[in-house]
Image (cartoon, helix red, strand yellow):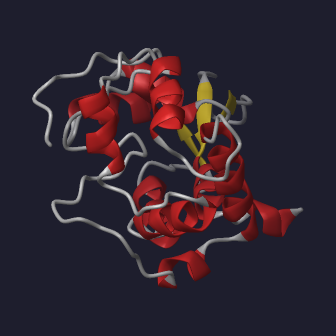
């Protein structure tokens, strides 16, 4: 039931491909009906709450299950023109019924595959000349647009949004500009911001 149709990008800049589910996860080639809940226990209470809220937004009819109509409405709101084949293909990659418990378990498995916080901190620290938890946005943008898997400036701005601030001029500094607060960014990704409250 695979679709050869290419999708147009949504207003958010995320296009859906036949190899990616609308939930941002790689498609399974098998029929995944049951999943392990081991990864679920690794989520923080903040992450669980955010996933519950996202589930409620996706469950348009409020019946406790993300079904064809819910998925079609979500794809439509992202600027997609979903066909029945596309919807069925997307739903075939997730457990059935796709209720809150299976949604949490399914997404927690994929979240657990993300790079651990200490590894991210080490990678960002390589750009932190002052060891103050910040990186010059211009320097980071240059690196992200020219090395490895290159990102567009629009994608970089979107990823850094909410984690930048104006640099305060200190001794020996000749320029201001924006800095990226990478420690805060990693804390949010890791669900550790709740520990600070």
Q: Report x, y in % for residue 85.
A: 24, 32
Residue furthest right as drawn: 197
Q: Quadrant of the C terminus?
A: bottom right
Residue furthest bottom as drawn: 38
Q: How many marks?
A: 0
Q: Is residue 35 above or below residue 175?
A: below
The residue positioned 60% from the left and 34% from the top of the image is 179
Q: Report x, y in % for residue 77.
A: 53, 19
Q: Is residue 35 above or below residue 86?
A: below
Q: Is residue 93 above or below residue 89?
A: below
> Is residue 138 in view from this perspective?
no
The residue positioned 42% from the left and 32% from the top of the image is 139
Q: Report x, y in % for residue 111.
A: 47, 63
Whether residue 196 sits left or right of residue 146 in the image: it is right
Q: Nearer the viewer, residue 145 or 84?
A: 84
Whether residue 56 sits left or right of residue 17 in the image: it is right
């Amino acid at each position: 039931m695979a679709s050869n149709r290419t999708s147009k990008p949504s207003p958010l800049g995320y296009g859906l491909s036949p190899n990616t589910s609308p939930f941002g996860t790689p498609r399974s080639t098998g029929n995944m009906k049951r999943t392990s809940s081991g990864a679920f226990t690794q989520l923080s209470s903040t992450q669980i709450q955010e996933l519950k809220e996202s589930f409620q937004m996706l469950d348009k009819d409020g019946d406790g299950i993300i079904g064809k109509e819910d998925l079609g409405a979500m794809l439509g709101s992202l600027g997609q023109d979903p066909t029945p084949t596309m919807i069925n293909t997307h739903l075939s990659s997730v457990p059935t019924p796709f209720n809150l418990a299976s949604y949490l378990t399914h997404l927690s498995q994929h979240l657990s595959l993300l790079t651990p916080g200490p590894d991210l901190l080490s990678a960002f620290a390589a750009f932190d000349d002052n060891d103050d938890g910040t990186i010059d946005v211009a320097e980071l943008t240059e690196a992200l647009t020219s090395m490895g898997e290159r990102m567009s400036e629009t994608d970089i701005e979107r990823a850094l949004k909410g984690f930048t601030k104006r640099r305060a001029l200190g001794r020996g500094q000749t320029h201001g500009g924006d800095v990226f607060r990478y420690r805060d960014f990693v804390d949010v990704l890791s669900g550790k911001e709740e520990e600070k409250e």
